[in-house]
Amino acid sequence: MAEKKSSLKKRNWAFFVYPTKEQLQALGSDYDGSDGYGTAPDDWIEQLKLSGLQFAISPLHDKDLHEDESGRTKKPHFHVIVVYGSPTTYNNVKRLTDSFNAPIPQALEQIRGYYRYLTHKDNPDKAQYDEKDIITGGGFNIADFVEISKSEVTEIKFKLQQLIREQQITEYFVFMNYVQDNYDRVYYDVASSHTIFFNTYIKSIRHMKNRNGYNVDPETGEVIE
């Protein structure tokens, strides 16, 4: 028998929020709340910050299409993850979502997959959004919720080594800046926790290029053609 929502207690929850009236007007959306849910209050993000909860808010999903053949665009919305300090009840979370005029919350068994859904990272058939536009607060760090296997670490190291070769990076700080700007916290964690491996590899590249007569920009670490 399915667990009753009123008795359900979880630490991790997800829900979505419609933008504020001002945001919807700027988007030219005609959503009027006719499905029973209204637009978010202007200060809903500030309310989340004041709640003390860890949270992550997706970029605005304004390009999602209905999965039928109509080709219609879905109502613009944000996906939100909230993390409580300890398991809390569905009713408690619903009081929060009700204050945002949002649909009912959904319990999350694990955060990693849903965090990736904030940008449709694993759904290439859906509209893609930029991870840099994810808003986090309350100390939320996706690396805290991801336990990756040894093989997954190896795969990430493999991809980051490819990155170094493709970008012709010859300085570790350039590598870390690139990872910070273009990859998620899991990749950043692998890059920063395997400093000896990557730094030794990068130094070897720089030594080889200098020996073979390449010029390297001392500020950016990039090869000057």
Image (cartoon, helix red, strand yellow):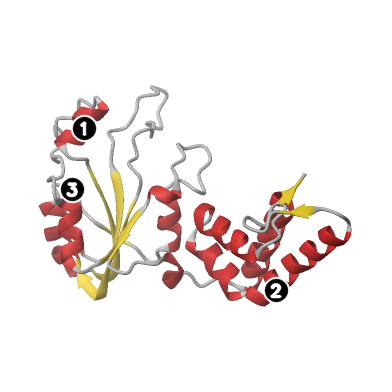
Q: Mark number for residue 123? A: none
Q: Residues within 10 Å of mark 2 (few under 14, many from 20)?
A: few
Which quarter of the rendered picture does the C terminus lie within? top right
Report the mark closest to the observer, 3 or 2: 2
User: Residue 172: percent from the left, percent from the top?
Assistant: 64, 65
Report the mark closest to the observer, 2 or 1: 2
Which residue type carries mark 2? Phe
Q: From mark 3 to mark 2, how far is it between C-alphas? A: 47 Å
Report the mark closest to the observer, 1 or 3: 1
User: Residue 211: percent from the left, percent from the top?
Assistant: 87, 61
Which quarter of the rendered picture does the N terminus lie within? bottom left
Q: Are marks 1 and 3 in contact (CB under 8 Å)?
A: no
Q: Is residue 65 above or below residue 46?
A: above
Q: Which residue is mark 1?
A: 24
Between 210 and 81, the one nearer to me in the picture: 210
Q: Residues within 10 Å of mark 1 (few under 14, many from 20)?
A: some
Which residue type carries mark 3? Ala
Between 24 and 124, the one nearer to me in the picture: 24
Q: Going from the N terminus, do you reach mark 2 or mark 1 first?
A: 1
**Residue at 62% over, 67% down:** 152
Image label count: 3
Q: Mark number for residue 197? A: 2
